[in-house]
Image (cartoon, helix red, strand yellow):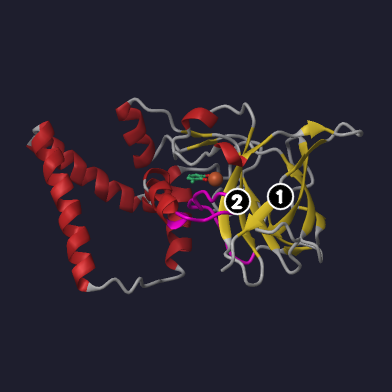
Amino acid sequence: MTTSESPTAVGSGTAATDKFLQERVSADTPPERVSAIAKDVLEALAGVIDKHGITYPEYRVLKQWLIDIGQFGEWPLWLDVFLEHNVEEVAYRGQHGTKGSIEGPYYVADAKTLPAKCELPMRDNEVGSKLVFEGQVRDLDGKGLGGATVELWHADDEGYYSHFAPHIPDGNLRGTIVADDEGRFEITTIQPAPYQIPTDGPTGWFIEKAGWHPWRPAHLHLMVKAPGKRAITTQLYFKDGEWIENDVATATKPELILDPKPGADGTNRVTYDFVLDPA
Ligand code: MBD
Ligand code: FE
């Protein structure tokens, strides 16, 4: 791809699929559990086919569309938008600290390491209003956590992510911030725009056919870690932001909303503290 190309569904999908496949994992699920889960999935689908009287043309369209999703590389996108929030809710059951939210398809490991007070890497002419995001990483007793890291990644002022849109330099608006000895950080970045699922790919066609909307509210993605603590993956949203109440990915939570206000110099600032459970 050249830097002058504009983003396409197949471009971001293929990049997300290639990135995902770089790390293969196994879940050690025993055969009895595989069988029980698979049986329930197949029974649920049988119920849908029966309930709605699915026709042969509809079955063929489903087959075509499933193949298209794979060929466009959109499985990471489709699965993270429509299913990940359920997995996330199960994973964080019984947890007391800051709420989690979904990782989504656009995380990239090994972002540039930055000091506690820093600016995220951005283009010289990066568009968007400046935002200063500060806070502290603490344990459940309120003690600041030395050695904490805050990985932050987010879309630009047009809703595009670096590594998944050809016109943005790698590493843009991504960083691993090393908090200070008390877990504090102060990060300067820009206000991201809402994210629109590409309308020129099978996830977008599916949403359009159903008459749904393809939008996520503007958000920051975070992974917060500290020694001996349970890491959290979460997202932060903006008060009164468009799509907050009807995120296509069902990933907003009332505890995860920022309310930035202009500081003395006119720059928008906001404080948010992260609380981590024991590992
Ligand atoms: C995103 O930016 C995102 O955060 C999720 C969860 C899905 C698609 C795009
Ligand atoms: Fe996102």
Residue extending farthest front: 141
Name the one closer to the observer, 167 or 253: 253
Query: Quadrant holding ligand 2?
Result: top right
Along the line of sight, which residue is nearer the eye, 72 or 260?
A: 260
Q: Is residue 157 left or right of residue 208?
A: right
Disc number placed over residue 98 in the picture, else none: 2
Q: Front-most of 248 and 23?
A: 248
Residue 25: x percent and y percent? 40, 71
Q: How many marks?
A: 2
Q: Position of residue 74 (x, y in %)?
A: 38, 49
Instruction: Determine the image quadrant of residue 31.
Output: bottom left
- Asked if residue 102 is among those painted magenta in the image, a careful observer would answer yes
The reply to whether residue 170 is in sight is no
- Classify mark 1: residues with Cα within 10 Å, few (<14), some (14-19) or many (20+): some
Q: Quadrant of the C terminus?
A: bottom right
Residue tagged by mark 1? 273
Sequence-wise first label, 2 or 1? 2
Q: CA distance from mark 2 to mark 1?
A: 8 Å
Residue at 74 percent of width and 61 percent of height: 143
Q: Residues within 10 Å of mark 2 (few under 14, many from 20)?
A: many
Q: Amino acid at mark 2?
A: Thr
Does residue 36 appear in this view?
A: yes
* Marks 2 and 1 close (CB-CB < 8 Å): yes
Can you say whether 44 is above or below 35 in the image? Answer: above
Q: Position of residue 214 (x, y in %)?
A: 44, 32
Of the 4 image quadrants, the one containing the N terminus is bottom right
**Residue behind label 2 places its C-beta within 8 angstroms of ligand 1:** no
Q: Residue at x 49, y 50 (%)?
A: 102
- Residue 26 magenta-highlighted: no
Look at the magenta stretch and give its main secondary structure. loop
**Residue segment shown in magenta:** 91-110
Please state if 72 lies on the left or on the right of 134 as rendered. left
